[in-house]
Image (cartoon, rainbow, N blue to C red):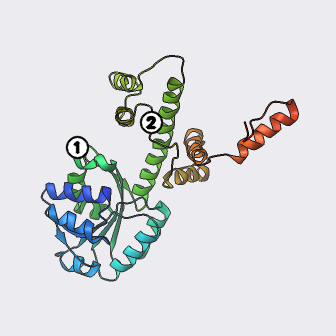
Amino acid sequence: MKIGFVGLGKMGANMVSRLSNNNHEIIVYDRSQDAIDKAVKNGVVASDSFEDMVNKLPGRKIIWLMIPAGKPVEETVRNLENILNKDDIIIDGGNSFWKDTIERGKRLAEKGIKYLDCGVSGGVWGLENGYGLMSGGEKESSEYIYPIFEALAPEGGYVYCGESGSGHFVKMVHNGIEYGMMQSYAEGFEIMEKSPFDLDLTKIGEAWQYGTIIRSWLLELAVLAFKEDPKLDRIKGYVSDSGEGRGTIQAAIDLDVPAHVITAALFNRFQSRQEDSFAMKVLAALRNQFGGHAVKTKEN
């Protein structure tokens, strides 16, 4: 197929390469000329504006967005909807909030433009391994672009989730689950690191990958990190979040679903950003007040 692709960040550039390697023709656009130049070296066609990209696409136009959620997606969709025609297709492959996706889909449907949402998992390893894809939106349009999904995903790695917003919703929950799994591994490795034994975490992680219940790709990535830096001395324990965990927890609240682990994992990320937590100071002060327990001051 011949498609337009907007957004050549780490994931976007690799997705373009994977599509090109599978004989799809790609017209790329990005705000960074350096990103465009690099992509062109890999055999794709450049465009210098949304209009130029659309004009280079034949017949029923297909455009994949791989850009940050929120304002960047909204501005890009607004630009495209004014130059696309009835039955043309926009696929939002980023982590847009699913309720925003539903509203955009309704707005574009009034113009006859098809708006699909596709959660993408695989990170920087997707070029080699393929991307897990979770798509939502009109089924006819999803089936029409199936060759694109087929090229990006490994065998069995694509699922059509249902109506507009469902793909982004499922990807959001996927990321929420990821938070909990990551936190569990982190806590387990810390317990071992602080144990009285001289444990080789790299070898233990590698052994766990064979036959154990907790083997996973996340564990494999942990082992890679330990190989590069066995005590993780070069890394600061500061963990950001993209908002997907927050969205999952809000959905759990709205649906009356107890989500203890995912919620705790998100709050641990918040705690990682506090160099000297005021809440912890309050706890120390209270223990000192009611029990006379010693407190550590900045002097000691």
| Classed neighbour count for the residue bearing mark 2: other residues with Cα under 10 Å, few (<14), some (14–19), many (≥20) | few
Q: Amino acid at mark 1?
A: Glu
Q: Are marks 2 and 1 in contact (CB under 8 Å)?
A: no
The C terminus lies in quadrant: top right
Q: Position of residue 228 (x, y in %)?
A: 35, 36
Of the numbered discs in the image, which one, if any, rests on residue 232?
A: 2
Secondary structure under the numbered disc 2 in the rendered image: loop
The N terminus lies in quadrant: bottom left
Q: Is residue 132 visible to us here?
A: no
Mark toward the start of the polypeptide (2 vs 1) = 1
User: Residue 53's image quarter?
Assistant: bottom left
Secondary structure under the numbered disc 1 in the rendered image: loop
Q: Position of residue 290 (x, y in %)?
A: 87, 33
Q: Is residue 75 above or below residue 289?
A: below
Residue at position x 45%, y 32% in the image = 231
Give the camera-side residue of 155 and 79.
79
Residue at position x 53%, y 54% in the image = 247
Q: Is residue 127 above or below residue 71?
A: above
* In-image side of 137 versus 87 (left or right): right
Closer to the observer: label 2 or label 1? 2
* In-image side of 215 versus 273 (left or right): left
Between the residue at mark 2 and the residue at mark 1, the CA separation in whole angstroms equals 35 Å
Of the numbered discs in the image, which one, if any, rests on residue 155?
A: 1
